[in-house]
Image (cartoon, grey):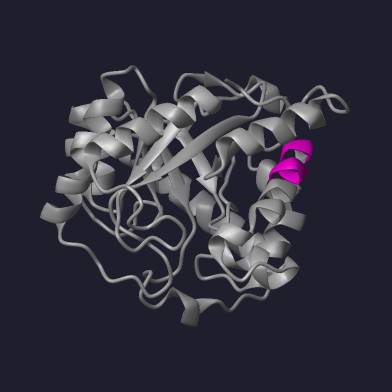
């Protein structure tokens, strides 16, 4: 399979594309509470684009382990001004949500990608909604909910089970009328996964790439990096995050969800001196 022939949301995946993270939440595991206003979040997103992000992922509900659900009205209040502000600057915006109402409103505000940590299983209205739209979609693997997912991290073959689940979700999308060409897959590192499961998914990434759809890897600052390599706080895991980004780029992954865009671009530029196929898009 020629992975460089793939594209997602209008982006050619002949090179690595970075999805920069803008969380407008008070309780996200890494950057919760840092963006006090919609204006600050838009400025942050624009800065990430300037640094080399091709996509900005806007989230208004924390999905860290143990997170408490956010009322829909509050999630809408948090994300819509940010999505609209970025879209007015022609930024390719992804809305990170599990809720069909938020998906619909964000798409109306200018988002062009829906990034659902539940793989469109949380809200029964999500599939029929997206079947009527032309948005690109990221399907992520997760068991349970953020509140209870840590208790569900039990696998005999985590790579095989995640791959099988993702393809079931792809089939559900196709059955609902959503073309496969609109989809990307995310194995959900850290979501209902112990550190060893996340490591196994990274080590088995070729099996996930063989599914034939764009693969998004979101390892940035996650706790498994600290458990495997050191780094007590989320902001102490830049080195491990960059190592994963480089290894995934070498393996053929072309979508990386990251907090530290400038640092990742720099690392990828150095990698490209040795491996011409691993070049960050800007």
Q: Main secondary structure of the magenta part?
A: helix
Q: Nearer the viewer, residue 177 or 186?
A: 186
Residue 265 left/right relative to 116: right
The single residue placed furthest to the bottom in the displayed view is 151
- Give the magenta range: 245-250
**Residue 157 locus on image (x, y percent):** 68, 69
Q: Nearer the viewer, residue 138 or 89?
A: 89
Q: Quadrant of the N terminus?
A: top right
The single residue placed furthest to the left in the displayed view is 73
Quadrant in the picture for residue 95: top left
Residue shown at 61%/71% (left/top)?
232
Residue shown at 61%/24% (left/top)?
13
Residue 236 left/right relative to 38: right
Q: Is residue 59 visible?
A: yes
Q: Is residue 208 magenta?
A: no
Quadrant in the picture for residue 194: bottom right
Q: Quadrant of the C terminus?
A: top right
Q: Is residue 132 visible?
A: no
């Amino acid at each position: 399979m020629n992975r460089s022939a793939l594209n997602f949301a209008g982006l050619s995946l002949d090179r690595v594309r970075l999805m920069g993270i803008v969380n407008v939440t008070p309780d996200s595991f890494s950057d919760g509470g840092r963006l006090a206003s919609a204006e600050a979040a838009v400025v942050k997103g624009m800065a990430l684009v300037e640094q080399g992000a091709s996509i900005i992922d806007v989230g208004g509900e924390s999905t860290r382990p143990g997170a408490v659900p956010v009322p829909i009205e509050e999630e809408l209040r948090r994300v819509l001004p940010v999505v609209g502000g970025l879209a007015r600057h022609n930024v390719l915006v992804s809305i990170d949500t599990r809720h069909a109402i938020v998906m619909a409103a964000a798409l109306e505000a200018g988002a062009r990608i829906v990034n659902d940590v539940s793989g469109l299983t949380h809200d029964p209205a999500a599939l029929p909604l997206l079947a009527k739209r032309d948005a690109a979609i990221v399907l992520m693997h997760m068991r349970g909910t953020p509140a209870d997912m840590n208790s569900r991290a039990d696998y005999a073959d985590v790579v095989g089970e995640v791959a099988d689940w993702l393809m079931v979700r792809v089939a559900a999308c196709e059955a609902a009328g959503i073309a496969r060409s609109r989809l990307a897959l995310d194995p959900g590192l850290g979501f209902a996964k112990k550190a060893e499961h996340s490591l196994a998914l990274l080590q088995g990434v070729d099996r996930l790439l063989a599914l034939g759809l764009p693969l998004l890897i979101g390892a940035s600052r996650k706790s498994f990096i600290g458990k495997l390599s050191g780094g007590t706080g989320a902001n102490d895991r830049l080195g491990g995050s960059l190592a994963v980004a480089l290894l995934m780029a070498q393996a053929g992954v072309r979508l990386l969800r990251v907090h530290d865009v400038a640092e990742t671009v720099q690392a990828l530029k150095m990698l490209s001196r040795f491996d011409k196929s691993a070049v960050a898009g800007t």
